[in-house]
Amino acid sequence: MTELVINQSELAAEIAAKLKSEVLAAVKAQAVGTVTETENERDVTFGDFLKCVALNDVQRLRAVYKSAKALDETTGAGGGFLVPTQFETQIRAVAGQMLFDQLVSAGRGPLVLRTNAAELALPVLEQDEAPNVESSALIGGVRLIWREQSQDVSESEPRFEQRVFRPYAADAYVAASTELISDAPQALEQFLTTLFGRAYATLKMRSILRGTGTAQPRGIVGHPASISVTRATGGTQVENDTNTILAMIQRLLPGSATAVWIAHPFWRSRLMATRLGEAMLYVASGQTLTYGDTLAGIPVAYSEHLPAVTSAGSLVLADLSYYTLVERANFSVAFSEHARFLKRQAVWVFSARLDGSPIVNAPLILADGVGTNTVSPFVEIAAGS
């Protein structure tokens, strides 16, 4: 008879190791979020996506939301998670009533391009050199040249330059209570969607108007292509404002069918008083204080991001079709529960990337032979009272 000898200590160690393995597997499944068929069926919402980011539920983020780490040259090793397309569309839709989106919807906004690349190179015409009297700066010097029968064709080549756009990173830092994150992801979804969507639309409009061009887009106010018009003096306030407006219209690039006035909000009462003889220049739509009124037949928009009324650039006449805005295709979102731990708050960082600038470098010289008469798609008022 064979005697079975059981080493009790070894058996106990084996049982303990097995139990520990099972416990660790269960904890990992709960913390990381093993994706099961039941979990896949739970609501696919932006709030749930944000909660997955907070819990670092990588498996569900990849399996359900198809989201990956937004690793690039600026985010570092950790990075954030790319926001799925359906939620990015939802975030952008929130900004429908913001000025930028209203201008785009009305066909008076800039050219907006999206790219997945770190930079985008666009060929543009050089339009800032004096043209031949038989041509125009608008078409980069190209002209049709008369010739007699059997004569050689004269050369007339367009002048091109390459404009390189490198979308810069802009981040929104938003703190929320840990209780809100764990208990009410739906409320968090509405809060962050609205907040980030409006902030992004505001950023774009601010950048187009007053971006410095240093690690951010270059705005039109104060740009070398913008023409500054001196304010008229010597008459009443209404007469001076009217004459200044007429002078600004004269310097606008001919054929700017999509031009728009953009004014500081405190300009409205003064603009409403302008008149040409007995005819009022200003027509109020009565619908919105943001966009929709007209001045001399050109739509008027109001932006708080322009300088105060007495400052240069507080009133702008712009054809934004001569401005290009380049966006990176995806937003990203990152989360930290440590940044404001003592305040019982967690931090979300939303990131977007964009670049932009006017596509003309200087005012355009008219082909009238004078050589000094200039116009521009961007005309701004000088400082004054």
Image: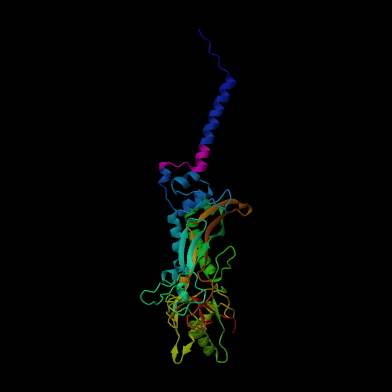
**Viewer-proximal residue among 11 and 251:** 251
Which residue appears at 58% of the width and 25% of the height? 13
Q: Is residue 30 magenta?
A: yes
Residue extent of the magenta highlight: 26-37
Give percent across and percent down for residue 2: 51, 9
Question: What colouring method underlies this structural image?
Answer: rainbow
Quarter of the figure with residue 256: bottom left
Q: Position of residue 373 (x, y in %)?
A: 52, 82
In the rendered view, would you say 334 is above or below 105? above
Location of residue 335 with respect to 301 vertically, above or below? above
Give the percent coordinates (x, y) of residue 381. 55, 80
Q: In the picture shown, does residue 263 fall above or below 38?
A: below
Left or right for 336, reference 290: right
* Residue 289 shows in the view: no
Please check the rendered image and state whether residue 2 is part of the magenta-colored stretch, yes or no. Answer: no
**The C terminus - image quarter:** bottom right
Furthest-left residue in view?
A: 149
